Amino acid sequence: MEAIKVKEDFYWVGAIDWNVRNFHGYSTVRGTTYNAYLLLDEKITLFDTVKHGFEQELFKRISSVINPEKIDYLVINHIEPDHAGAFLKVFETVRPEKIFLTKNARLGLLAYFHKENFPFEEVKTGQEVRVGKRTIKFIETPMIHWPDSMITYIPEEKILISQDAFGAHYATSGRFDDEVDLCELTQESAKYYANIVYPYSPQVNKLLQMVKSMSLEIEMICPDHGVVWRKNPGKILALYERWSSYICDPRVLIIYDTMWKSTEKMAYAIMEGVIQEGVEVKLCKLSVADLTDLMREVLEARGIVLGSPTLNNGLLPTVSGFLSYMKGLRPRGKVGAVFGSFGWSGEAIKILNQYLDEIQAEKVSEGIKVKYMPDEKALAECMELGKKVAKKVKEFYFAEK
Ligand code: FEO
């Protein structure tokens, strides 16, 4: 386990978690990495640590370059345990002269570890520290995606160390964007944004504008998960600009579940209507869907049509579970509609509409509900609903062009 040279005097010394498949509910089907970076200068600096349990991998990689005890400075960009879980072990081994972090990170680490007397040095946006030939510049990024978060920039190397931002849960033997499948990387980056960063899109947009106004030249982006963007950092910056501005593809998702296939018949009829308008559509049945993969689809699709039969005056549990998750991730800029079958009370439509209201979707109608089983007339209405959604999605698309 060796350090990987990123640039002269700058190394990746993190850990690869090939086998994690559930990251606090996020389905990490391609595993993940916990990235840490080492800068060799007059003051040797370690940026972030790793998840608890991966300390030996971190130390082995550092030791392939220098004795870990020679590290002078530790920069904590983010305190979530996948990056700061090894903090205590690293601190006890390295005994750094200084630990740079935000005020919220200091308070957070004290709340996690309940120990005092760390050589913390709080930093704010714009502050710099000279480490020899190079400078480390700190930029606070509160709520991207925790209150403690910050990113660090090394102007002499044009390197941005970005903690979770621009990352992906993606375990690979390649450490750089030009060493992996770009299609897989883009998919994993989108999934990561949708499930981790999406609620904080306004903050991301503000950060991107700030980076522009500071005229930071960025040759490489080094996130805390996934690969280093060295060949094309502009690609991930452009994607973040797009996602944080709620720009979507002209596509419709029909997200539903069904008890006795009445709601499913409606879903198929709505799908047919969308197809007839020449718009791409995906049918997403929640009893067989991966919720985190589905959120990636939600991020990128303009149209969201929600369907559920009424069960016990509410929604099917698969539907309410997903919608509760989706609501917390705060999608915006969607076109929406709802549908569902019922037997006697029929509250599902009202509840589905409430979810659309909460994500501020533009509804094309108040939805369609059908008693027991849709007849030909009801299916024709469903098809019309699909057409209506598709037309609105096309309007958005042409307005954005
Ligand atoms: Fe990768 Fe917010 O921790």
Image: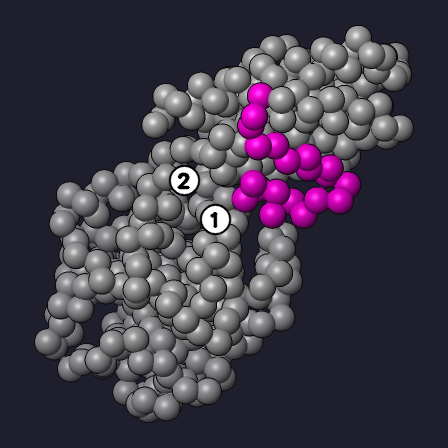
Going by the image, does 169 lie left or right of 289?
left
At 65% across and 44% down in the image, what residue appears? 291
Q: Is residue 83 magenta?
A: no
The percent position of residue 369, horizontal first and vertical second, equals: 76, 13
Residues drawn in magenta: 277-297
Helix, strand or loop for disc 2: helix
> Above or below — where is 98 with respect to 81?
below
- 75 in relation to 201, above or below: below
Residue 394, given in percent of the width and then of the height, sits at 48, 22
Q: Which of marks 1 and 2 is nearer the N terminus?
A: 1
Look at the numbered disc 1 and give the secondary structure of its residue: helix
| Number of numbered labels in the structure image | 2
Residue 167, horizontal then vertical, whole percent:
42, 57
Q: In which quarter of the image is residue 253?
A: top right
Q: Nearer the viewer, residue 121 or 315?
A: 315
Q: Name the residue under label 1.
A: 190
Q: Does the magenta stretch include residue 292?
A: yes
Q: Residue furthest top?
A: 377
Q: Which of the colour schemes (rainbow, by chain, secondary structure, one colour) is used?
A: one colour
Side (left or right) of 117 relative to 342: left
Q: How crowded is mark 1: few (under 14 residues within 10 Å), some or many (20 or more)?
A: many
Q: Which of 168 and 120 is in front in this view?
A: 168
Residue 66 image offset from top left, x and y in percent: 31, 90
Is residue 280 rendered to the left or right of residue 350? left
- The answer to whether residue 169 of the structure is visible from this angle is yes
Rounded to the nearest angstrom, the CA distance separating label 1 from label 2 is: 8 Å
Q: Are marks 1 and 2 in contact (CB under 8 Å)?
A: yes
Residue 243: mark in rendering: 2
Q: Which residue is drawn at 49% across and 68% down?
A: 33
Q: In which quarter of the image is residue 69?
A: bottom left
Q: Mark 2 is on which residue type?
A: Trp
Q: Residue at x 50, y 71 (%)?
A: 172
